[in-house]
Structures are given as structure tokens and as C-alpha cells.
């Protein structure tokens, strides 16, 4: 009865999802997350904004052409105008030759902001990939552990059926029968719990991928990541270079922008020099007059050098420079703290990698030993040379060894993904292009 009820409940849980669901692979899940992520969409928009601002930053270096036209009538009482028509046309060309270095500095900052936006996109993208990959590995682990517990249940159920039959025949004691029945119920609970764990992980993945879970779309399930020994065969011996991390590169660029901002304010403290040139063609009073457009046309030009220096400002500009320097120091301190955090994470990551690699190697060896041990116990139990307690303990040890092996493998895979993220190569490594 117990075995039949479990099979029915398992079918109820799995058939709607596994049998009829659209199966998504690991790489497909990564690609879907990248395409649907609202965060990445917002960062892409930010990149577009910085590209436009960078293009605009070149405008001050180009000549400006302006056309001003005025047409109308005027009057007064008593009349003072010989011509009540108003007409004026000005065509002006201006060029700023030098503006104390402000436009050049702003263009440099605009270029840096564009680079920061691009790096920020890559960092956000890789963080999303890392989150999806971590949850996907957890889903794969849950499915593998579910299979292990299902296999355990089937083995115990088979043994229980045998013991139950022998108990009815008087061959086995009531103690043997109750022990196996208790172990069967425990195994059923664990198997059913694993089904719930798999479904929870599936829902978490759907949220990360931006897939609707309100039941209006076709069911979606995920192909588990298979155990591939070559994927964990090589463990990096050194921590990833901090300079390769996107956040480190962003921090370095932010420092350049801060330096530019201080530079602009500091230039205002000293005498400012400006060079400009311009030309204007003016035509006026051509309406209501016998003179034509060409007869009233005048042309003027200029080439100017200007010096701007505030002799007395009661220390305002000096204080502005001090404020800019303090803000720069504050921001650099925050950046330094973030970089220290990344550095510490790198060192912890290497410790975790080494420990996980060792755990996986030992767990593989342990599983081999437990498998041989259980096969021997099962043979001895059939021959009546070991007790039911020995076979139950042996089965538990075998299950524990399988759990340790699967857990250590997927943990190691996840930490290798983390390493690639800190190295700035996670997207390339997964190859979700």
C-alpha cells in the first residue's frame, strides 16, 4: 500500500511537468535570462544614453551656424519712424577655439562614462549568469538526489515486500518486519520531500529567467547538468587577478572622472583664458524700402582672446576646490573598500575551491567503497549471515555517500563558475552566445 500510494503521488507531481514540459538546457536558460532581464535592458539603455552624450561632447569643437530673422511692423504716436516695417536677417558663424580646457575634459569624461556603462553591463550580465548557473546547479543536484532517494525507496520497498511475505510465513520475526516498515516510511518521506525540493528550485529558475509561472504558458522544465569529470579536472592554482574584475576596471575609470571634475574646478581658481572667432552677415530694413537685400547687407568678423580672473571672491573658489578634493577622497575610500572586499572574496574562493576539490575526490572514493560494501552486505543478507540492521545501515551509508558525491560535485562546479566571474570570463566560459 505504501509503495502504491507513493507511486501515484510521484506521478501526480511529475507527469504535468516532466512528461509534457518544454525542456530547457543550461545554455538556453542562460540565454533566456540575458534576453528577458529587466536589469540588463535598463543597462543597455544606459549604454545608449552615454553613447549619445559622448557624441554630443564633440559639438563644442565644431563651428556653430545660427540664423536669426525678424519680420514685422512697428509704430508710435507721434510717429518717430521713417519706416514702420521691421526686417532683420542675421547669419552668424561662431567657433570656440579654446575654452580653458573645459570642453576637452568633458569629452574625456563622456568617453569614460561610456566605457563604465559598457563594463557595468558586462558585470550585471555575468552576475545574472552566475545567479542562474548557481540555481540551475541546485536544480540539477535536487534532481539527482531525488533519483537517489527514489532508488533507495524502491530497494527498501522490495526488501520490505520480501520481509513482509516471510513474516506472514513465520520465517521473519515481527521485529524485522517493523524495522523494514519503519525504514520504508522514512524513505518514502525523503523521496516525497525531494519532489517538493525539485519543484521549488524549478520555480526559482523560472523567476530568474523571467518566465511566467501563472499557468498561461506551456510547462517548462530544465535538463539537469550531467556529471562531467573533465569539467572539474583542472582547478586554478592562483586567485584571479583583481585587475581583470569588471568592478575593479569600473573603479579605476571612476577615479579618472573624479580627477577630471577636480581639474575643472581647479582651473576656475586660476585665470581663465578663452579664444573664439566669429563672422556675421547682417541684412536689415529691406521691407518697405527701395533698397534690396544685397544693398543693406553688411559683414563683420571677430577673433577674440578673453581673460577671466576673479580677483576677490572671499575664498569661495578655494573652498570649492577643497570640497571637490574631499568628495574625491571620500569616493576613492569607498572604492578602495569595495576592492578590498573583492580581494578577500578571491582568497576565500581559492580556499573553497581547494577544499571542494578535495571533498569531491574523497567522496568519489567513498562512494566506490560504500557501493562494494553494500553489495557484499546484500549478498550476506540473502545468505542469512548478516542482520536486517546491517543491511539498513549499509543502505543508509550508500545513500549518504551518493549524496556527498553529488553535493561536492555541484558545489565544485558552482565555485568554478564563481572563479570565472571574478576572472571576467564567465560569459566566454559558458558560451551562451
Image (cartoon, helix red, strand yellow):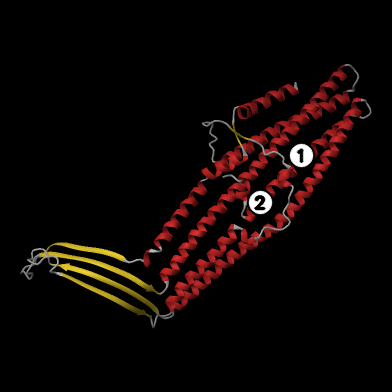
Q: As drawn, which residue projects farthest toward the bottom? A: 311
Instruction: Depth check: give the residue in front, 291 or 381.
Output: 291
What percent of the width, then of the height, locates residue 239? 70, 58
Which mark is on residue 269? none
What percent of the width, then of the height, locates residue 38? 50, 46
Task: Give the quadrant of the N terminus.
Answer: top right
Position of 268 compared to 135: left or right?
A: left
What percent of the width, then of the height, locates residue 48? 45, 53
Q: CA distance from mark 2 to mark 1?
A: 22 Å
Instruction: Depth check: give the residue in front, 211 or 83.
Output: 83
Q: Give the vertical position of 173 relative to 242 (above or below).
A: above
- Total numbered circles: 2
Position of 118 compared to 60: left or right?
A: right
Q: Earlier in the sequence, mark 2 or mark 1?
A: 1
Q: Secondary structure at mark 1?
A: helix
Task: Give the quadrant of the C terminus.
Answer: top right
Q: Secondary structure at mark 2?
A: helix
Residues tagged 2 and 1 counted as in contact (Cβ below 8 A): no
Q: As drawn, which residue projects farthest toward the top? A: 169
Residue corresponding to mark 2: 418
Q: Give the vertical position of 151 relative to 304 (above or below).
A: above
Q: Is residue 411 visible?
A: no
**Which of the two marks, 2 or 1, is nearer to us in this view?**
2
- Mark 1, other Cα within 10 Å: few <14 / some 14–19 / many ≥20: many
Residue corresponding to mark 1: 403
- Mark 2, other Cα within 10 Å: few <14 / some 14–19 / many ≥20: many
- The image quarter in which residue 205 lies: top right
Amino acid at each position: 500500500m505504501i509503495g502504491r500510494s507513493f507511486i501515484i503521488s510521484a506521478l501526480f507531481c511529475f507527469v504535468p511537468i516532466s512528461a509534457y514540459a518544454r525542456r530547457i538546457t543550461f545554455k538556453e536558460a542562460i540565454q533566456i535570462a540575458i534576453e528577458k532581464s529587466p536589469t540588463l535592458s535598463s543597462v543597455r539603455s544606459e549604454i545608449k544614453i552615454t553613447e549619445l552624450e559622448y557624441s554630443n561632447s564633440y559639438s563644442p569643437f565644431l563651428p556653430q551656424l545660427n540664423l536669426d530673422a525678424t519680420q514685422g511692423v512697428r509704430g508710435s504716436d507721434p510717429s518717430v519712424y521713417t519706416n514702420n516695417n521691421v526686417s532683420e536677417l542675421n547669419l552668424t558663424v561662431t567657433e570656440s577655439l579654446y575654452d580653458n580646457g573645459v570642453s576637452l575634459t568633458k569629452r574625456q569624461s563622456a568617453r569614460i562614462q561610456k566605457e563604465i556603462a559598457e563594463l557595468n553591463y558586462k558585470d550585471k550580465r555575468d552576475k545574472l549568469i552566475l545567479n542562474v548557473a548557481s540555481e540551475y546547479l541546485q536544480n540539477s543536484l535536487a534532481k539527482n538526489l531525488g533519483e537517489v532517494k527514489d532508488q533507495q525507496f524502491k530497494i527498501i520497498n522490495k526488501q520490505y515486500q520480501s520481509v513482509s511475505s516471510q513474516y506472514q510465513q513465520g520465517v521473519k520475526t515481527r521485529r524485522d518486519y517493523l524495522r523494514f516498515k519503519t525504514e520504508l516510511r522514512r524513505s518514502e518521506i525523503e523521496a516525497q520531500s525531494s519532489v517538493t525540493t525539485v519543484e521549488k528550485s524549478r520555480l526559482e529558475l523560472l523567476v530568474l529567467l523571467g518566465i511566467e509561472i501563472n499557468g498561461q504558458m506551456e510547462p517548462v522544465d530544465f535538463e539537469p547538468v550531467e556529471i562531467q569529470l573533465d569539467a572539474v579536472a583542472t582547478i586554478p592554482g592562483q586567485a584571479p587577478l583583481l585587475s581583470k574584475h569588471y568592478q575593479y576596471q569600473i573603479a579605476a575609470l571612476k577615479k579618472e572622472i573624479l580627477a577630471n571634475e577636480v581639474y575643472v574646478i581647479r582651473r576656475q581658481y586660476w585665470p581663465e583664458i578663452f579664444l573664439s572667432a566669429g563672422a556675421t552677415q547682417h541684412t536689415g530694413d529691406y521691407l518697405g524700402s527701395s533698397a534690396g537685400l544685397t544693398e543693406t547687407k553688411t559683414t563683420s568678423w571677430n577673433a577674440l582672446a578673453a581673460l577671466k580672473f576673479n580677483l576677490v571672491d572671499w575664498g569661495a573658489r578655494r573652498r570649492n576646490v577643497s570640497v571637490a578634493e574631499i568628495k574625491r577622497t571620500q569616493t576613492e575610500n569607498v572604492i578602495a573598500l569595495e576592492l578590498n572586499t573583492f580581494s578577500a572574496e578571491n582568497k576565500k574562493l581559492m580556499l573553497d575551491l581547494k577544499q571542494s576539490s578535495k571533498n569531491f575526490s574523497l567522496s568519489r572514493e567513498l562512494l566506490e567503497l560504500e557501493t562494494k560494501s553494500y553489495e557484499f552486505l546484500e549478498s550476506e543478507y540473502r545468505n542469512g549471515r548478516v542482520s536486517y540492521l546491517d543491511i539498513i545501515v549499509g543502505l543508509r551509508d550508500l545513500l549518504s555517500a551518493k549524496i556527498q558525491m553529488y553535493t561536492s560535485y555541484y558545489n565544485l562546479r558552482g565555485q568554478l563558475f564563481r572563479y570565472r566571474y571574478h576572472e571576467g570570463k564567465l560569459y566566454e566560459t559558458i558560451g551562451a552566445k
